[in-house]
Image (cartoon, helix red, strand yellow):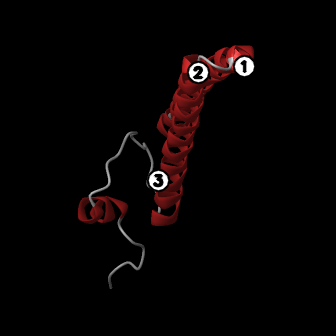
Protein backbone atom coordinates (compact mmCIF):
# COMPACT_ATOMS: atom_id res chain seq x y z
CA UNK A 1 0.00 0.00 0.00
CA UNK A 2 1.26 3.44 -0.88
CA UNK A 3 2.00 5.99 1.78
CA UNK A 4 -0.45 8.87 2.01
CA UNK A 5 2.25 11.37 3.05
CA UNK A 6 3.10 13.73 0.21
CA UNK A 7 6.66 13.62 -0.98
CA UNK A 8 8.29 17.03 -0.57
CA UNK A 9 11.02 16.53 -3.15
CA UNK A 10 8.44 15.47 -5.75
CA UNK A 11 6.37 18.57 -4.94
CA UNK A 12 9.46 20.81 -5.35
CA UNK A 13 10.24 19.35 -8.74
CA UNK A 14 6.68 19.78 -9.98
CA UNK A 15 6.15 23.29 -8.66
CA UNK A 16 9.48 24.74 -9.76
CA UNK A 17 10.23 26.17 -6.31
CA UNK A 18 13.87 26.63 -5.51
CA UNK A 19 15.51 25.65 -2.28
CA UNK A 20 17.81 28.09 -0.56
CA UNK A 21 18.57 25.79 2.31
CA UNK A 22 19.31 22.14 2.90
CA UNK A 23 17.22 20.28 5.42
CA UNK A 24 18.96 17.36 7.07
CA UNK A 25 15.83 15.54 8.19
CA UNK A 26 12.66 14.36 6.55
CA UNK A 27 10.16 17.17 6.27
CA UNK A 28 6.48 17.00 5.63
CA UNK A 29 4.89 19.16 2.99
CA UNK A 30 3.15 21.45 5.50
CA UNK A 31 6.48 22.44 7.07
CA UNK A 32 8.10 23.01 3.70
CA UNK A 33 5.24 25.25 2.60
CA UNK A 34 5.50 27.20 5.88
CA UNK A 35 9.17 27.81 5.10
CA UNK A 36 8.30 29.01 1.61
CA UNK A 37 5.63 31.38 2.97
CA UNK A 38 8.16 32.81 5.41
CA UNK A 39 10.73 33.28 2.65
CA UNK A 40 8.20 34.98 0.37
CA UNK A 41 7.01 37.18 3.23
CA UNK A 42 10.61 38.23 3.86
CA UNK A 43 11.05 39.18 0.21
CA UNK A 44 7.75 41.09 0.19
CA UNK A 45 8.79 43.05 3.30
CA UNK A 46 12.16 43.86 1.72
CA UNK A 47 10.48 45.18 -1.42
CA UNK A 48 8.15 47.29 0.71
CA UNK A 49 11.11 48.93 2.43
CA UNK A 50 12.70 49.63 -0.94
CA UNK A 51 9.45 51.05 -2.37
CA UNK A 52 8.94 53.34 0.62
CA UNK A 53 12.55 54.48 0.43
CA UNK A 54 12.13 55.31 -3.25
CA UNK A 55 9.04 57.39 -2.48
CA UNK A 56 10.97 59.36 0.12
CA UNK A 57 13.86 59.75 -2.34
CA UNK A 58 11.55 61.10 -5.03
CA UNK A 59 9.93 63.48 -2.57
CA UNK A 60 13.34 64.67 -1.38
CA UNK A 61 14.47 65.33 -4.95
CA UNK A 62 11.34 67.32 -5.69
CA UNK A 63 11.60 69.41 -2.53
CA UNK A 64 15.28 70.15 -3.06
CA UNK A 65 14.65 71.32 -6.63
CA UNK A 66 11.98 73.83 -5.64
CA UNK A 67 13.50 77.29 -6.00
CA UNK A 68 10.52 79.29 -4.78
CA UNK A 69 10.23 77.52 -1.43
CA UNK A 70 13.64 77.79 0.19
CA UNK A 71 12.15 77.50 3.68
CA UNK A 72 11.19 73.83 3.10
CA UNK A 73 14.60 72.66 1.92
CA UNK A 74 15.16 71.13 5.36
CA UNK A 75 12.20 68.85 4.66
CA UNK A 76 13.90 67.65 1.47
CA UNK A 77 17.10 66.86 3.34
CA UNK A 78 15.11 65.08 6.05
CA UNK A 79 13.31 62.99 3.41
CA UNK A 80 16.65 62.11 1.84
CA UNK A 81 17.98 60.95 5.21
CA UNK A 82 14.84 58.89 5.84
CA UNK A 83 15.20 57.26 2.41
CA UNK A 84 18.78 56.21 3.15
CA UNK A 85 17.77 54.85 6.56
CA UNK A 86 14.91 52.86 5.01
CA UNK A 87 17.21 51.34 2.38
CA UNK A 88 19.75 50.30 5.01
CA UNK A 89 17.10 49.00 7.41
CA UNK A 90 15.38 46.98 4.68
CA UNK A 91 18.61 45.33 3.54
CA UNK A 92 19.67 44.64 7.13
CA UNK A 93 16.35 43.01 8.09
CA UNK A 94 16.24 40.95 4.87
CA UNK A 95 19.74 39.57 5.38
CA UNK A 96 19.18 38.96 9.09
CA UNK A 97 15.99 36.92 8.62
CA UNK A 98 17.45 35.00 5.70
CA UNK A 99 20.50 34.09 7.77
CA UNK A 100 18.30 33.00 10.70
CA UNK A 101 16.19 30.79 8.44
CA UNK A 102 19.24 29.12 6.95
CA UNK A 103 20.77 28.56 10.37
CA UNK A 104 17.53 27.14 11.77
CA UNK A 105 16.80 24.78 8.90
CA UNK A 106 20.35 23.58 8.28
CA UNK A 107 21.40 22.78 11.83
CA UNK A 108 22.17 19.15 12.55
CA UNK A 109 19.67 17.19 14.57
CA UNK A 110 20.62 14.36 16.90
Q: Are marks 3 and 1 in contact (CB under 8 Å)?
A: no
Q: Which quarter of the rendered picture does the C terminus lie within?
A: top right
Q: Which quarter of the rendered picture does the N terminus lie within?
A: bottom left
Residue at screen point 54% across, 49% down = 41
Relative to 98, 11 lies left or right: left
Relative to 94, 77 lies left or right: right
How far across and how far down the image is residue 9, in percent?
31, 59
Q: Mark 3 to mark 2: distance in Å? A: 46 Å
SS at mark 2 in the image: loop
For disc 2, the marked residue is 66
For disc 1, the marked residue is 72
Between circles 3 and 2, the one closer to the viewer is: 2
Q: Quadrant of residue 66?
A: top right
How far across and how far down the image is residue 40, in percent?
48, 50
Disc 2 crowd rating (10 Å Cα; few below 14, some 14-19, many 20+) is: few
Q: Earlier in the sequence, mark 3 or mark 2?
A: 3
Q: Are marks 3 and 2 in contact (CB under 8 Å)?
A: no
Q: Mark 1 to mark 2: distance in Å? A: 9 Å
Q: Are marks 1 and 2 in contact (CB under 8 Å)?
A: yes
Foreground residue, 4 or 102? Answer: 102
Q: Residue reaching furthest front?
A: 68
SS at mark 3 in the image: helix
* Residue 80 - label: none
Amino acid sequence: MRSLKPNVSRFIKRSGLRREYVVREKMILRDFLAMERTRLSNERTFLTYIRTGLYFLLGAGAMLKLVEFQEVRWLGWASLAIAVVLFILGIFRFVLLRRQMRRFYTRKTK
